[in-house]
Image: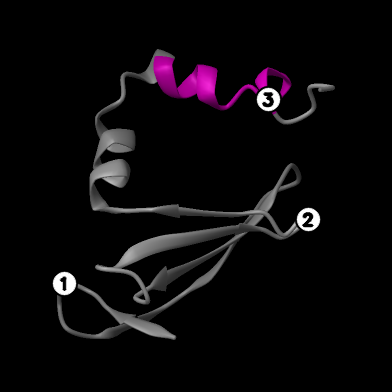
Amino acid sequence: MAAIDDEGSAAAGGIVASEFAAVRATVDTTANGPRLRLQDRRTGRVRFLDALELEMIIWLPEGHLTRLLDPSADRWRDT
């Protein structure tokens, strides 16, 4: 599924990857409004982010984002 960007051209999803993670990002339009669909390529886990959540990430101070990126905080914790 393609989304339309600010300039009116089609913007398809894609994969963002590094040596630590691989995530597929697409725009989902099946809910009440468009939202970003993120899928962990390793586990298949999916998270949806709406415009407000995405803007919040942009405005986070660096220290807050750094804490969120610590994989030992949640990802590999035994429950």
Q: Look at 31% across and 25% down and name the residue there.
A: 60
Q: Does label 3 or label 1 sit earlier along the sequence? A: 1
Q: Look at 52% across and 17% down and name the residue there.
A: 67
Residues under labels 3 and 2: Cα distance? 16 Å
Q: Quadrant of residue 24?
A: bottom right
| Residue annotated with mark 2 | 42
| Residue annotated with mark 3 | 74
Amino acid tagged 3 = Asp
Q: Residue 56 in the image: state x and y as whole percent.
A: 27, 35
Amino acid tagged 2 = Arg
Label 2 residue SS: loop
Local crowd size for mark 3, using a 10 Å CA cut-off: few (<14), some (14–19), many (≥20): few
Q: Residue 43 in the image: state x and y as whole percent.
A: 77, 54
Q: Residue 17 in the image: state x and y as whole percent.
A: 65, 55
Q: How is the image coloured?
A: one colour
Left or right for 4, reference 49: left
Residue 71 highlighted magenta (yes or no) = yes
Q: Quadrant of residue 78?
A: top right
Kindly identify which numbered label has been placed on residue 6: 1
